[in-house]
């Protein structure tokens, strides 16, 4: 393991039995798991290189049960790691040996559907896809659509401010979250926001969204829902070079056409996808899939404009889908890209985000760094909002290869920050990019963020060792404690 | 004055000369104003019923000068009231007698225009309209467009999370603010956000936007800019009753058509507007102006769908603009509505916001309350996002009439909160709605908001007596101080 984790609190480990008993006293019998065989299922999330079984797992069904768990853990000084479906690619739900995992999957009720006011209220353990599935017969959908949407929960989406291919047009979770019920470590329950335009006073909902379980556990959420568009149609555009494809993305955005999605795939990715899914993609250095939606007139109009923008850049191919089958064929390869890459070997998936105009430069720099580190990289990502997902290929069985891949990844993320971008678009910081936060923020910025955490979670029990650099957070905690003593 | 203000700090008043001298030591001579003749210009904002000359006024030109002011005021314990153009309708920039007004109007440089990456960087004293004016030759614009856009500054827009008629499609300030340079009371300078997708770690930009000068002074901002649409076209629809007009709004929103603006005017407003601007509006109980934009094909398509939705509700008129003159005629009355109302007498303009589906009910309740309080009310507002602006008419020369109007206004805002809405859509809480915050939030919610303020402004020097109920904030401060003493 090349990312350091703090030593577990031995006092907490020592009183493990007492902690489990206290949790059993406030929860139904089936809601507390401490059998090591069973807790093992929670030892990692989708960043599988890092694992650690927790002390215990709780699976509450109500906000009141979550509050009871928080009070017990707070009283006994036990860290709590909230967990949605465990699909975090950044180790956002990685346990520590002294923690209780608070799983949200049984908080799975749809509470209210209101199409006239365009919102739903859900318990946050519902999966992302099930929200849209419930809405489909009514002609509505919930916009954020991460690749993991079949499994991932709204709780995890809120914690990570998740995105997806449709975010270019509809925004990420923070743009679609209207309200939340949050349980703090004290057991206090806050109701933030609601189905109106915006909150009066300080907008705590905004800072909660994307806070990666650092501030509280969100048990209920009010989500904006949208009417399903009449239709959608993708086009596929092939280019001679990554830079020209990047230029095409920037030109589309600049022109004012707003596609629902602009996806990018480079040659290594296209090769893997062809071998796996035989999607019939052209053989060229870079491909864009651009999807537009709306009424037939709107779709025709937008595609005509995209055709014109692309034509000025001499594409090697411009393939328009004329029916549902052709649309499916265009998406087939993209949707299987991560699976296809997995067959090539181990990979790390990055999530750096850059201003769209910096895509050509960033793609060039990634190529240079690939040669420098001697590791292959494939690019497949949401180009329209500059959210890059370079996949660094390595061999997990080769000693030192993971560490080399991580060093390469860190260099790519530093380039993203350098051009005015940031470490993460939708995966979150987690443990993975925790120590790179010092490249993104100066110490004053980090201190203020940590002070805001102090307000919500004064004892720092929530989701330890994530988001903030270990050294900086340890120093901050020591300072806070000594200041309180001096006062 | 029926809204109480706290007594000024006599120790601060007593050392007025020393404070001014300290400010003069760090700023150019013309940047400090303490002549009572001149400071009088800053004694109120657009909530003109409330006035109080400040101790002094500073007009810094750079972030460094703002930081110097903050350090001086922090050292001497002087409250600071940040002020944009003073167009707040909620008393958001109302001075206290012991405060220094920090005016942002000389922070007026355009720093960077980047159309490829769709952002501008500005000093925040630039006016809202000047940003779009700079961008016009390049084919771009900045979306939030409050009615006061000719005068109001980006600083004020960020503080109040300002909206405007175009917000229905493009969102309010928080949806268009990408980054900010903020000076804290300590003089510390934070750089938040930037032109990328979203921040890593805690999203402090979100909580800053709309914080009404409670957390820091924003000196520079990165704003998202948009390509100008090819065209725009309004339609005017007249209805038999306010409720049916409200239903039409809800049905349009529900259908998935997304107009740029849906504006509502009721009979009292239409009467005033006709007398003043002779816009040729129909004589009926409620009128909607719905504007759509895009390419010609998109516009035609959207108007056809709106026509169909309206037809189902038997409108008394459906007037489509066929050219620029007709479009102007449709907007003429709406744009002069506030001026027209002003000729009828004094009024208070409210800003409560409700879920769109609650518009019919809320309009009916406002009518009932009007009869109950014996005061006339006119409604003219951004209906598409439920942002209501009831205008309560009263006579400032009649003793007790202002207080009656304020009581009526408070009742309307309570109805907004009751139906799931909130106190303010775009004007902010200010002093005006400060004490109603207890109707919107329970004590725990308010405490967390105040604790977040503690992080940014521990001595509570920034913009005193706004946003938080006076009693609640005094109690919070007393508790914080006694806890620090006990530790």
Image: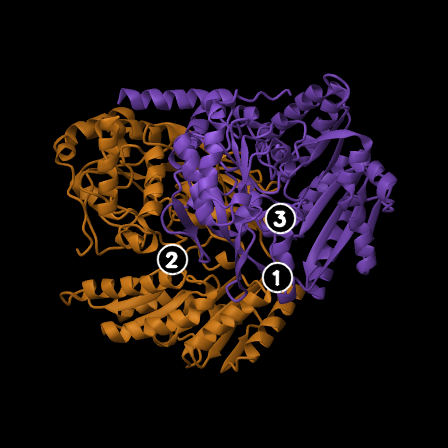
Chain colours: A purple, B orange
In-front residue for pair B474/A243: B474
**B403 horizontally vs B137: left or right:** left
Distance, label 3 to label 2, CA atoms, is 27 Å
**B104 horizontally vs A347: left or right:** left
Q: Which residue is under mark 1?
A: A135
Q: Where residue B158 appears, x then y in whole percent?
A: 41, 45
Q: Is residue B455 visible?
A: yes
Q: Which residue is under mark 3?
A: A167
**A281 horizontally vs B42: left or right:** right
Chain letter behind tag 1: A
In-front residue for pair B196/A175: A175
- The N terminus of chain A: image quadrant: top right
Residue at far top of view: A399
Q: Which residue is under mark 2?
A: B422
In-front residue for pair B445/B416: B445
Distance, label 2 to label 1, CA atoms, is 26 Å
Disc 1 crowd, CA 10 A, few/some/many (<14, 14-19, 20+): many
User: Residue at left 53%, top 55%?
Assistant: A122
Q: Are marks 3 and 1 on the same chain?
A: yes
Q: Are marks 3 and 2 on the same chain?
A: no
In-front residue for pair B182/B215: B215
Q: Which mark is residue A66?
A: none
Chain letter behind tag 3: A
Q: Where residue A290 appears, x then y in whole percent?
A: 73, 50
Callout 2: helix, strand or loop?
A: loop
Callout 1: helix, strand or loop?
A: helix
């Amino acid at each position: 393991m090349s990312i350091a984790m703090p030593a577990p609190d031995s006092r907490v480990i020592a009183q493990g039995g007492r902690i489990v008993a206290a949790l059993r006293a406030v929860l139904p019998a089936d809601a507390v798991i401490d059998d090591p065989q069973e807790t093992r299922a929670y030892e990692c999330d989708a960043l599988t290189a890092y694992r650690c079984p927790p002390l215990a797992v709780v699976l509450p069904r109500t906000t009141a049960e979550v509050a009871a768990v928080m009070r017990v853990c707070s009283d006994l000084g036990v860290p709590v790691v909230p967990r949605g479906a465990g699909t975090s690619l950044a180790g956002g739900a990685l346990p520590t040996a002294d923690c209780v995992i608070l799983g949200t999957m049984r908080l799975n009720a749809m509470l209210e559907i209101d199409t006239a006011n365009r919102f739903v209220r859900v318990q946050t353990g519902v999966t992302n896809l099930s929200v849209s599935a419930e809405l489909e017969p009514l002609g509505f959908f919930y916009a954020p659509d991460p690749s993991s949407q079949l499994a991932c929960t709204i709780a995890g989406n809120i914690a990570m401010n998740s995105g997806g291919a449709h975010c270019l047009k509809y925004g990420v979770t923070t743009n679609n979250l209207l309200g939340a019920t949050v349980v703090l470590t004290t057991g206090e329950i806050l109701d933030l926001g609601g189905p109106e335009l915006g909150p009066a006073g300080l907008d705590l909902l905004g800072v909660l969204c994307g806070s990666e379980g650092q501030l509280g556990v969100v048990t209920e959420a009010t989500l904006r829902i949208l009417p399903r568009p009449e239709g959608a149609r993708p086009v596929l555009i092939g280019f001679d070079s990554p830079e020209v494809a990047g230029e095409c993305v920037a030109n589309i955005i600049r022109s004012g056409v707003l596609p629902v999605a602009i996806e990018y795939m480079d040659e290594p990715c296209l090769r893997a996808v062809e071998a796996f899914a035989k999607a019939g993609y052209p053989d060229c250095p870079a491909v864009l899939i651009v999807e537009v939606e709306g009424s037939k007139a709107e779709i025709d109009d937008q595609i005509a404009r995209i055709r014109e923008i692309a034509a000025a850049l001499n594409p090697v191919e411009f393939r328009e889908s004329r029916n549902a089958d052709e649309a499916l064929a265009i998406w087939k390869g993209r949707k299987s890209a991560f699976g296809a890459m997995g067959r090539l070997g181990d990979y790390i998936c990055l999530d750096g985000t850059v201003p769209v105009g910096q895509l050509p430069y960033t793609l060039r720099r990634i190529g240079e760094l690939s040669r420098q580190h001697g590791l292959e990289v494939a690019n497949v990502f949401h180009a329209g909002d500059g959210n890059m997902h370079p996949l660094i290929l390595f061999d997990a069985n080769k000693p030192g290869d993971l560490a080399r891949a991580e060093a390469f990844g860190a260099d790519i993320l530093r380039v993203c920050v350098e051009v005015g971008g940031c470490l993460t678009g939708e995966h979150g910081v987690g443990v993975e990019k925790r120590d790179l936060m010092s490249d993104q923020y100066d110490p004053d910025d980090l201190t203020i963020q940590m002070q805001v955490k102090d307000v919500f979670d004064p004892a720092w029990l929530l989701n330890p060792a994530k988001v903030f650099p270990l050294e900086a957070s340890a120093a901050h905690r020591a300072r806070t404690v000594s200041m309180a003593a001096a006062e």
